[in-house]
Image: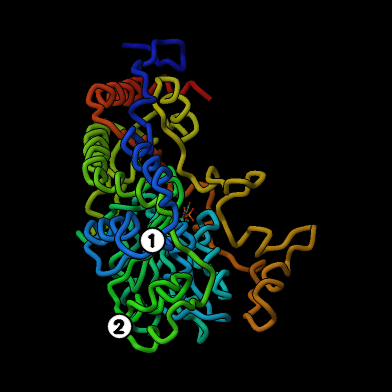
Amino acid sequence: MTQLAILGGEPAITINQSPYVQWPIYTEEEAQVAADLVRNHALSSAQEGPGPITELEQLVAETWGIKYAIAHSSGTAALRTALFGVGVVPGDEVITQSAVHPFNCLPIIGCGAVPIFADIAPLTMTLDPEDVERKITPRTKAIMVVHWKGIPADMDAIMDISKRHDLKVIEDVAVSQGTTHRGRMVGTIGDASGISFQDGKLTSAGEGGMFMTNDDEVHQRAATLGHYERLKTLPDPKWQAVSGFSFGEKYRMATITAAIGVVQMKRWKGRLAVRHDNATRLGQAIAEIKGFSMPDFPDYFASPYHSGHVRFHPNQLGSVSRETLLKALQAEGAQVSSPARKDSRIPHTAGLQRMLHKHPVFAGNEYGTDNILWEVLGPNATKVDYKNVTLPVTEDPEVPYDTIQLPSFTRPADELIDQYVAAFDKIATNADALATID
Ligand SMILES: Cc1ncc(COP(=O)(O)O)c(C=O)c1O
């Protein structure tokens, strides 16, 4: 039996993985379109007429199968527009998840609205519909769903709640572009949505975002936030009459971003298919190995492999802990990580966990940050006692239980996948030896 690498054996994975995990993939074509815009002095879309921004909007609308797409300077700006478009106004409450970095929350505060945190479901790490319903008050205007890293939220239940309570639904698709829910692209199910084009996201162009909706009224209202040049094109004469004005800061995307986005979007379906094929091949093969399986995701999630999560069964693997299993796989060369709540940190902080209700903005700290949110929102916003908010699943350090995160391969990677499968196989075959590692 081959010895585990963590115990001094040879690693199972020997291929250089850098080219296979590279993302975003930019080429000379992006450099060329950017240079052309500079040479042509066409860096702003203030000039009227067709151009890269319109082209990118059309490509996104076609790809998502949605009626309206408006390009924005960031994903958060697109989400702010989505909230504004559905009519969120200062003082409203918007229910969203706490188990995330703050980006879903920022546009809610940007609207002068109050974020109300609901718990998540332990397997999907997306909003728990039952807790959402418990959090509804007479001031609730909308639910902001976050589809989490390729795992869709339970949109059947969320849409049902929204209908029964007359609430609007915004979908944050910043980290789940291309994910489907019962065959529908997420971002097309609620009243409005936003995606991000920030580098590293599944749609990338440096920075940028896209607001999307199928609703004529939501689209018109959304266009009046920071898109003053578009008002004259809206069908409602009320908006046309105030053309050249807007009800918020300018959120326009730069042409250079849009041009890069166009090149990216033209290749997007192909690139996503490669990632999905790799994820399916790797996930299915690992799930065949004793001691491993796919997480038991809900049936609305048609492509569970794409989340990159794999479940392990400690009782079949020498009672191994997640930490030891990860160390053993990493020693074999596998780029695996922990999706556990305790290991998920907010960037640019001194290691704060992704639990917004515990963030000093909401929970306060020894520097007296308790009132920061109310200084920003003003005295009329509901004062939530965030300190006493308890979200048991969000706070559970081990959620999602017995699960590890696989890398996503961005180029055809058959040989590398074979080596990964061999690494997992080696771990399973040496389960007894795992029990000796601490
Ligand atoms: C869940 C989520 N929502 C929204 C955003 C906002 O996107 P952007 O950085 O383009 O503003 C991000 C960015 O990381 C995100 O992860």
Foreground residue among 150 and 31: 31
Q: Where 259 sits versus 128, above or below?
A: above
Q: Which residue ends up furthest to the front in the rendered image?
A: 40
Q: Which residue is mark 1?
A: 71
Q: Residue 224 appears at what percent x and percent y? A: 44, 76
Q: Which residue is mark 2?
A: 235
Dot 1 or dot 2, earlier in sequence: 1
Q: CA distance from mark 1 to mark 2?
A: 19 Å
Which amino acid, by three-letter code, is at mark 1? Ala
Q: Where 8 sits versus 341, above or below?
A: above
The residue at 28%/23% (across/down) is: 416
Foreground residue among 391 and 382: 382
Q: Quadrant of residue 221?
A: bottom left
The residue at 40%/62% (across/down) is: 47
Query: Quick check: 26 left or right of 337?
Result: left
Q: Residue 383 appears at what percent x and percent y? A: 66, 77
Residue 197 in view, yes or no: no
The quadrant of the picture occupied by the N terminus is top left
Circle 2 — which element?
Answer: loop
Q: Where 218 sits versus 425, above or below?
A: below
